[in-house]
Amino acid sequence: MTSDLIALLILALWTLFLNHLPALARVQVAGVQWALSNREDKPTTPAWVERADRAQRNHLDNLALIATVVLMAHVIGRNDVVTAIAAGVITSSRIAHSLFYLAGQPLLRSSSYFVSVLGLGMIVIHLWI
């Protein structure tokens, strides 16, 4: 498996953490009965739980684009050291983005987002050059 695909796999697995973190926090507050219900009422939770929801949505919104670009490079045989480094930059900055989101650090969150966009841009440019 190439470095690019390993980076993509890490991002896919990171989705598990982001998907379950807010739910587990709500179960801790509201109990198992709430988790087994239709969950029409949201329990009152700390602010970080809502940020976790937003981080998860942001991650999922970006994952399809990242996967498309990384897989295109792989399929057309343009994956090399450039795409490996870029995929590593994307992966580390996307994970940092989520953690900064959870911590309520908007400047660091936004900075890590833009770093991931630069990494994505590196791969896109590499597809054409």
Image (spheres, grey):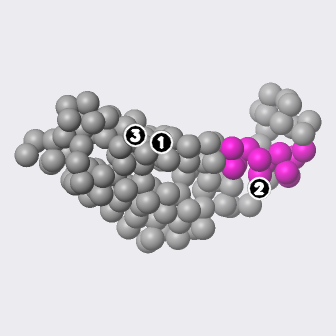
Mark earlier in primary sequence (3, 2): 3
Which disc is residue 25 wearing? none
Which residue is located at x 24 percent, y 43 percent? 79
Magenta segment boundaries in residue numbering: 20-31
Between disc 1 and disc 3, the foreground one is 3
Image coords of residue 78 (percent x, y) = 19, 40
For label 1, the residue is: 9
Evaluate whether residue 94 shows in this view.
Answer: yes
Viewed as shown, does residue 52 lie left or right of 38? left
Q: In this view, does 61 lie to the left or right of 32?
A: left
Q: What residue type is labelled 2?
A: Thr
**Residue that label 3 marks:** 1
Q: Can the viewer see residue 65 in this picture?
A: no
Q: Is residue 122 left or right of residue 47?
A: left
**Magenta stretch contains residue 62:** no
Q: Which of 110 and 87 is in front in this view?
A: 87
Residue kind at label 1, given as amino acid type: Leu
Q: How many angstroms separate mark 1 from mark 3 (CA)?
A: 10 Å
Residue 22 part of the magenta segment: yes
For marks 2 and 1, give the one nearer the viewer.
1
Give the CA distance from mark 2 to mark 1. Answer: 31 Å
Q: Residues within 10 Å of mark 3 (few under 14, many from 20)?
A: few
Instruction: Identify the element where label 1 is drawn.
Output: helix
Most common secondary structure along the magenta stretch: helix
Q: Quadrant of the N terminus?
A: top left
Are there few (<14), some (14-19), or many (20+) residues within 10 Å of tag 1?
A: some
Q: Residue at x 52, y 70 (%)?
A: 105
Q: What residue type is labelled 3?
A: Met
Q: SS at mark 2?
A: loop
